[in-house]
Amino acid sequence: MQYQCGPNILELVPGDICHQQVDAIVNAANEQLSVGGGVCGAIHKAAGPELALACAAIGGCPTGESRITAGFKLAAKHVVHAVGPMWHSRSADAVQLESAYVSALTVAAQNDCHSIAFPAISTGIFGYPLDEAAAIAIRTVAHFLEHHTQITLARFVFMNDETFEAFRYAARRHLASTAVVGK
């Protein structure tokens, strides 16, 4: 599914983020930028051991922020490591999740990236409720695309139907007035 957001495109696709042909993919990282499970583990495995070394050299990243490394063996030139919050049912969680998305987009744009692929940050082992996380992610990324021209394509990539459906529902609610470019 594609949506027009200002001059740019927001996409929702099923698939494996490790195989996306974009300038940068986003890793749902932890504060230590260490190899984890889920999406993080898959990205590290696909990129090769150089990614863990590059992350160790950075030394960490606070929640709500992001850092960038090379993509090494990935199709993407860069990996943006965005640290979302652990779910605690606080209003600060939503602020930090929004900040993680904005930071990832900003860091990518600052590094001459024009396309970026996201997973559903914080919805795995960090426990963020899927429907709430999807609404925050769609609203935040769409707003960024509407007001910035550097990133021309932001793609959300989902490995399972439940996550895809939650994001599709959030996109339909938030982008109802936006012209649908594709299916």
Image: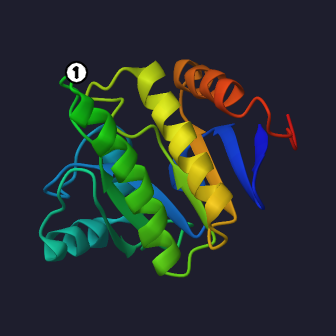
Provide residue 114's location: percent of width, then percent of height.
Answer: 63, 71
Q: Is residue 92 above or below residue 172?
A: below
Q: What percent of the width, then of the height, locates residue 122? A: 33, 36
Q: Quadrant of residue 68 in the image? A: bottom left
Between 35 and 124, the one nearer to me in the picture: 124
Q: Position of residue 27 (x, y in %)?
A: 38, 53
Along the line of sight, which residue is nearer the eye, 31 or 45?
31
Residue count near mark 1 (Cα–Cα under 10 Å), binned few <14, some 14–19, many ≥20: few
Describe the element under mark 1 as helix, strand or loop: loop
| Residue 108, visible in the rendered structure | yes
Relative to residue 137, is residue 150 depicted above or below?
Answer: below
- Camera-nearest residue between 42 and 61: 61
Q: Is residue 107 left or right of residue 6?
A: left
Which residue is identified by label 1? 89
Residue at 43%, 51% (x, y): give it.
101
Q: Amino acid at mark 1?
A: Ser
Q: Nearer the viewer, residue 72 or 136?
A: 136
Q: Quadrant of residue 161?
A: top right
Q: Residue at x 36, y 30 (%)?
A: 123
Locate residue 159 relative to residue 58 in the image: left or right. right
